[in-house]
Amino acid sequence: MPELHHRMKPDEAVCGVKGCEKAAVRSLPTKKVSGNIAAGLKGEEARRTPLCKEHYREYKRATKDERLTDSLGWQR
Ligand SMILES: [Zn+2]
């Protein structure tokens, strides 16, 4: 079965966000993604969720805030 030779290329997958049919550029652990995408996911039973460029950016923005805050040493 030559089909099995397919690597799990993220860019062959479709974005896992609800209502989004764009090609995915990244695949991330569903647990991490689910809380950071406002639109929600098509399904959360998969371990990893593919994200398109836009939603990956949204995810990154949502998570970067914490890291940025951390690296800048902000104090509240
Ligand atoms: Zn998307």
Image: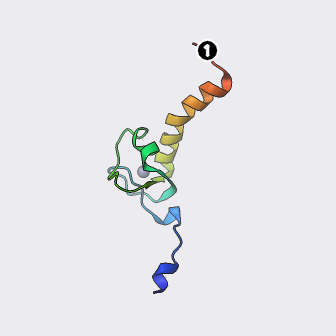
Residue 43: x percent and y percent? 32, 53
Q: Nearer the viewer, residue 35 or 54?
A: 35
Which residue is rendered at x = 37% and y = 52% of the image? 20
Which residue is rendered at x = 51% and y = 51% of the image? 53
Which residue is rendered at x = 61% and y = 14% of the image? 75
Which residue is rendered at x = 51% and y = 63% of the image? 11
The count of marks equals: 1
The residue that disc 1 covers is 75
Residue 8: x percent and y percent? 51, 67
In the figure, 64 relative to 49: above or below?
above
Q: In this view, does 72 lie to the left or right of 7?
A: right
Q: Nearer the viewer, residue 43 or 24?
A: 43
Q: Which residue lies furthest to the right in this view?
A: 72
Q: Which residue lies furthest to the top in this view?
A: 76
Rendered image quadrant of residue 64: top right
Residue 44: x percent and y percent? 35, 51
Q: Quadrant of the C terminus?
A: top right
Q: Residues within 10 Å of mark 1 (few under 14, many from 20)?
A: few
In the figure, 2 relative to 51: above or below?
below
Q: What residue type is labelled 1?
A: Gln
Q: Is residue 66 left or right of residue 35?
A: right
The colouring scheme, among rainbow, by chain, secondary structure or one colour, is rainbow
Q: Disc 1, ligand 1: is the CB inside 8 Å? A: no
Q: Quadrant of the N terminus?
A: bottom left
Label 1: state its secondary structure: loop
